[in-house]
Image: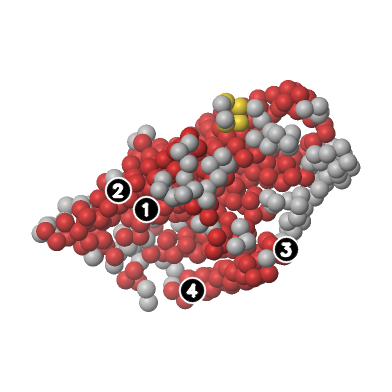
């Protein structure tokens, strides 16, 4: 039925099977859209947010998808600026993933502001003293960059490519992609960093507060570093899922090994910096505010916020994946590599959870108690919405666009 | 916001934030304009012989 649209030389499942899959995921999208409409029509009082939790599940999801989508800017930087040519075989997929992640972030923000018709206020009535203004500017511009990076792949669709203008446009865009990628890396550095900076400048919340360099707290640099380190892990996790669903090998091992090696070294150096930051915060910064480290991880009613969450974030989901990916034998073993990249993706998400929600949960006044938070169903539905939307975008891209340059070669070899 | 709007203030904050913002927009806009105009030129005036790929 749609065979004329499918790239030449590759096999795809039948259209009815594909349609059923999309319809199932589409039902989840509809549930999310319903949750979104409930939030917009009834207001943010339908959420679990209150005076303690101005930032909650949505902001965690925002920070997490932006960190996980960091694979796009970092891989683009390596491919177009540092000329790591092997990554051309995975760059299309990483860009699509980045596009999905940033579209998700913007969608969630559009719900979180409660009144999306006033979303443009942040550009027009900008508070130029706020790190979040910088985030909004860079996030929007970087989404434009990802869209521009995605367009040539769309124009390479078998039918669109027959149109001379589209063919020429796609070729010209490839020609200047390094400029777009450099702009994207510049924008990403600042918005990833500023998301960390938002937590680090909260001097009224000693759990988050960090000293730093000039106007930038150390969390600024740690957030950018962690996104560059763990973003490629998420790209490899989604690639592995795509390969499992399609029952095909889509990218050669040498490309994955290279990306895993770079990611491993980035994670290892990041986690050393993170450990130093944590020790300095626990022994200097927090005591200078009259608090001990134990105050932030113990106490009546602290729920899940005990030392285990710190150990999980830093050791299990930081040190372990870093080591697994820098040691050649474990990096090249599919099982240990899969464990490492899954732990990495969980680790950066957990870091964002801690820096958003544990910050809000810790008591700040002597008479305060630990404040725990439980999201409501509209928050959960609207957080799952972009995940389901992302699955649809990736499925459509895989079916109709030449996303993986090595797919044809790899699967011919498998058949033989 | 533009410098000719009444809310604009000539201070470092506005210059850095909006300077960076408009700089990034200009690069993206100029890059895309160049690609589109070149593609139009090639489509209209070139003979269709394809040596791109």
Instruction: Please rate how many residues cluster around mark 2, counting C-alpha atoms within 10 Å: few if below 14, some from 14 to 19, many from 20.
Output: some
Which residue in the protein does label 1 denote? A148
Tell me how far mark 4 sits from mark 1, CA to CA. 28 Å
Q: Decide which of tag 3 and tag 1 comes sooner along the chain.
A: 3
Tell me how far mark 2 sits from mark 1, CA to CA. 10 Å
Which chain hosts label 2?
Answer: B
Q: Residue at x 55, y 38 (%)?
A: A193
Which residue in the protein does label 4 denote? A19
Rendered location of residue A14, percent (x, y):
44, 72
Give the number of the disc on residue A45. Answer: 3
Q: Decide which of tag 4 and tag 1 comes sooner along the chain.
A: 4
Contact (Cβ within 8 Å) of mark 2 with mark 1: yes
Which chain hosts label 3?
Answer: A
Q: Secondary structure at mark 4?
A: helix
Q: Do the residues marked 4 and 1 share a common chain?
A: yes
Q: Nearer the viewer, residue B16 or A109?
A: B16
Tell me how far mark 3 sits from mark 1, CA to CA. 37 Å
Q: State which mark lies toward you, 2 or 3.
A: 3
Q: Secondary structure at mark 3?
A: helix
Tell me how far mark 3 sits from mark 4, CA to CA. 37 Å
Give the number of the disc on residue A41. Answer: none
Q: Which quadrant does the C terminus of chain A fall into?
A: bottom left
Q: In the picture provided, is A294 more to the left or to the right than A72? A: right
Which residue in the protein does label 2 denote? B31
Q: Is residue B31 visible?
A: yes
Q: State which mark lies toward you, 4 or 1.
A: 1
Q: Is residue A325 visible?
A: no
Q: In the picture provided, is B9 more to the left or to the right than A49? A: left
């Amino acid at each position: 039925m749609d065979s004329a649209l499918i790239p030449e030389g590759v096999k795809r499942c039948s259209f009815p099977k594909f349609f059923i899959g999309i319809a199932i995921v589409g039902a989840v999208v509809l549930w999310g859209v319903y949750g979104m409409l409930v939030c917009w029509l009834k207001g943010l009082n339908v959420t679990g947010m209150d005076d303690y939790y101005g930032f909650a599940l949505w902001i965690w999801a925002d920070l997490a998808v932006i960190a996980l989508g960091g694979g796009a800017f970092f891989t683009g930087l390596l491919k177009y600026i540092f000329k790591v040519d092997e990554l051309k075989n995975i760059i299309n997929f990483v860009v699509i993933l980045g596009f999905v992640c940033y579209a998700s972030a913007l969608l969630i923000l559009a719900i979180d502001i409660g009144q999306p018709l006033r979303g443009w206020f942040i550009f027009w009535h900008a508070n130029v003293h706020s790190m979040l203004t910088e985030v909004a500017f860079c996030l929007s511009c970087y989404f434009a960059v990802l869209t521009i990076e995605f367009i040539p792949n769309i124009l390479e669709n078998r039918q669109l490519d027959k149109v001379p203008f589209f063919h020429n446009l796609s070729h010209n865009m490839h020609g200047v992609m390094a400029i777009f990628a450099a702009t994207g890396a510049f924008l990403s550095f600042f918005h990833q960093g500023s998301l960390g900076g938002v937590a680090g400048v909260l001097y009224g919340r000693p759990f988050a507060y960090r000293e730093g360099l000039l106007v930038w707290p150390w969390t600024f640099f740690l957030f950018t570093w962690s996104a560059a380190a763990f973003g490629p892990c998420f790209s490899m996790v989604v690639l592995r899922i795509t390969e499992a669903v399609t029952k095909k090998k889509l990218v050669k091992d040498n490309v994955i090994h290279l990306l895993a090696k770079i990611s491993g070294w980035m994670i290892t150096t990041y986690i050393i910096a993170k450990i130093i930051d944590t020790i300095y915060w626990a022994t200097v910064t927090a005591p200078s505010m009259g608090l001990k480290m134990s105050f932030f991880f113990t106490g009546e009613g602290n729920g899940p916020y005990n030392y285990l969450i710190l150990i999980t974030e830093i050791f299990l989901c930081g040190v372990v994946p870093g080591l697994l990916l820098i040691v050649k034998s474990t990096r090249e073993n599919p099982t240990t590599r899969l464990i490492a990249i899954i732990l990495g993706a969980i680790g950066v998400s957990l870091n964002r959870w801690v820096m958003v929600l544990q910050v809000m949960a810790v008591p700040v006044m002597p008479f305060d108690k630990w404040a725990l938070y439980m999201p409501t169903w509209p928050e959960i539905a609207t957080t799952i919405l972009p995940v389901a939307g992302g699955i649809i975008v990736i499925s459509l891209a895989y079916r109709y666009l030449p996303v993986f340059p090595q797919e044809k070669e790899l699967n011919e070899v498998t058949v033989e | 916001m533009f410098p000719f709007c009444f809310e604009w203030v000539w201070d470092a904050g506005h210059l850095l934030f909006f300077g960076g913002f408009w700089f990034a927009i200009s690069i993206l806009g100029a890059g895309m304009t160049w690609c589109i105009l070149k593609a139009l030129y090639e489509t209209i005036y070139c003979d269709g012989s394809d040596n791109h790929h």
